[in-house]
């Protein structure tokens, strides 16, 4: 016959297993993943969808940045896409370790392969610049620790994160 203390321990273990399975099935895993990326780095999933009439039927340049420098971030938050693309070489010279960037140029309707971006720990923000013909900021500030999906439309782009 089992003693009362062993029955109690077995009940507590069973309760812990049930609670753990409930917690992991409720999305806590994503938060753990984000926290791990903040401390250790990792990969960010990047997806782009290009509409058949994107940028008024013109190629569109896009640059994704992971920013690690506070001063640079402050400047880039005020920079529109037109100025970014005009001065991007200077930013690379002035802040050689302040950010990582990936540049693409796509034509309307092009199918784009999903990519993974390597993320260093302690990123301050992610920024996205799209070189649209339509005037405006054409810039988005993003959470650097979440995956990105960009939809390039006729006159503007949208971004979602998960």
Image (cartoon, grey):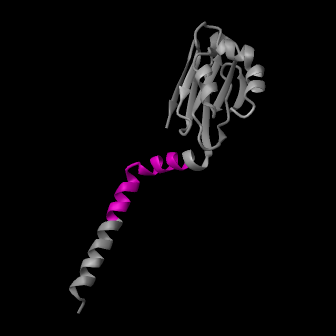
The residue closer to the viewer here, 40 or 54, is: 40
Left or right of 22 on screen, residue 135: right
Considering every residue shown, the one lying at the far front of the view is: 71
Q: In terms of image quadrants, where is residue 73?
A: top right
Considering every residue shown, the one lying at the far left of the view is: 4
Left or right of 117 on screen, residue 19: left
Left or right of 51 on screen, residue 98: right
How many callouts does the rendering have? Answer: 0
Q: Which residues are magenta?
A: 18-36
Q: In terms of image quadrants, where is residue 91?
A: top right
The residue closer to the viewer here, 36 or 153, is: 36
Question: Does the magenta stretch mainly form a helix, a strand or a loop?
Answer: helix
Name the image quarter holding the N terminus. bottom left
Residue 12 position (above or below residue 103): below
Image location (x, y in percent) of residue 5:
24, 83
Image location (x, y in percent) of residue 58:
69, 12
Image location (x, y in percent) of residue 116:
65, 41
Image location (x, y in percent) of residue 26:
37, 50
Residue 3 position (above or below residue 105): below
Q: Is residue 51 visible?
A: no
Q: Is residue 114 visible?
A: yes
Q: Which residue appears at 32% of the width and 61% of the height? A: 19
Q: Is residue 136 magenta?
A: no
The residue closer to the viewer here, 4 or 74, is: 74
Q: Which residue appears at 65% of the width and 22% of the height? A: 109
Considering every residue shown, the one lying at the far bottom of the view is: 1
Q: Which residue appears at 62% of the width and 14% of the height? A: 80
Q: In terms of image quadrants, where is residue 88?
A: top right
Q: Is residue 24 magenta?
A: yes
């Amino acid at each position: 016959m089992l003693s009362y203390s062993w029955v109690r321990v077995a009940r507590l273990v069973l309760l812990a297993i049930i609670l753990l399975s409930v917690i992991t099935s409720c999305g806590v895993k994503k938060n753990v993943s984000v926290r791990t990326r903040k401390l250790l780095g990792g990969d960010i999933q990047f997806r782009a969808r290009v509409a058949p009439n994107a940028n008024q039927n013109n190629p569109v340049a896009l640059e994704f940045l992971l920013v690690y420098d506070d001063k640079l971030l402050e400047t880039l938050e005020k920079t529109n896409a037109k100025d970014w693309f005009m001065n991007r070489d200077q930013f690379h010279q002035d802040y050689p370790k302040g950010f990582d960037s990936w540049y693409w140029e796509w034509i309307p309707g092009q199918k784009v392969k999903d990519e993974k971006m390597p993320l260093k720990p302690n990123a301050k923000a992610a920024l996205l610049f799209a070189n649209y013909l339509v005037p405006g900021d054409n810039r988005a500030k993003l959470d650097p620790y979440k995956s990105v999906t960009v939809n390039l439309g006729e006159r503007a782009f949208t971004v979602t994160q998960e």
